[in-house]
Amino acid sequence: MKLILIELQKTWLETETLRFRQYLGTQYSDPANIVKEDGINSHAIPMVTVYMLGHRVGDIEEPVLYVNHKSYNYDGVEVTKGIPDPFVDSLVHDSIIVQIPLLGGTINNRLDKVLSVFDQSHKDKYNQQVLNFDDNAFADDAEMRHILHRLLAAASDAKLRQDMNVEDEYFSAIEDRDTAIMLRDKKIAEQGSQLAEKESQLAEQKSQLAEKDKALLSSAKALKQAGLSVKQIAEMTKLSEDTINQL
């Protein structure tokens, strides 16, 4: 027996990971998830968490990711004798992560067929909350018809539909906020790039002016050594007489 926990997440939120961890903590500490074998000894029901995510997870390309724990000894050799063990399985759990945006395409196995009911490529053109399916696609599959029946029953629930509308408005506000932040950050980055370019140009101009001043001083010094008067040199180089006198 295993306890299957299914979590659905429509879009990425900064608090998502913390919320999942808090939910897992609640399940680990729930006495209802403890099985008593002989009235004295007891162990927790092994858990498997299934995360149905409406967003991508990093750069992972697989639509379905299985995260299974294993046991190793000190030398890194996998321990198989005595495994699985109720005590070990009570303290760790396996996970299945489904990236819904990556679902779609050819159905190669039973899992692909089951998950096809979440394939977002079937979204209705006018109502993004609705997925369109061919009624005959699962005519010979009782389990798939049962899944569709449960989903249709949920979609027909007035309160659930109202909750979905409220949720869409909530996530729309979040997306608008994230878009505004992204545009702001982009603008700040562009302004920073422009500022850096201007600073580079100013530094180059300053360097050029320093070289020009150095050349003028060298010319003035040469003219002074040639016997020209300070006044003549000032007229020719546009340097002040005090500057020429200090050469």
Image (spheres, rainbow, N blue to C red):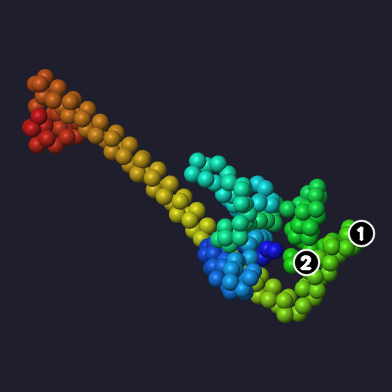
Left/right of residue 151 with respect to residue 19 in the rendered view? right
| Tag 1 secondary structure | loop
38, above or below 185, in the image: below
| Few, some or many residues within 10 Å of mark 1 (<14, 14–19, 20+) | few
Within the image, what quadrant is residue 222 found in? top left
| Few, some or many residues within 10 Å of mark 2 (<14, 14–19, 20+) | some
Left/right of residue 84 with respect to residue 134 in the rendered view? left
Q: Residue furthest top?
A: 226
User: Between 135 and 21, which is closer to the camera in this rendering?
Assistant: 21
User: Between 34 and 182, which is closer to the camera in this rendering?
Assistant: 34
* Residue at image coords 17%, 34%: 239
**Alpha carbon separation for disc pair 1 and 2:** 23 Å
Q: Quadrant of the C terminus?
A: top left
Please give the residue where the numbered disc 1 appears in the rendered image. 140
Q: Residue furthest bottom?
A: 159
Q: Amino acid at mark 2?
A: Val
Percent coordinates x, y for residue 216 in the rendering: 20, 29
| Tag 2 secondary structure | loop
For residue 130, which numbered disc appears in the image?
Answer: 2
* Residue at image coords 50%, 53%: 186
Q: Amino acid at mark 1?
A: Asp
User: Between 10 and 184, which is closer to the camera in this rendering?
Assistant: 10
Q: Quadrant of the N terminus?
A: bottom right
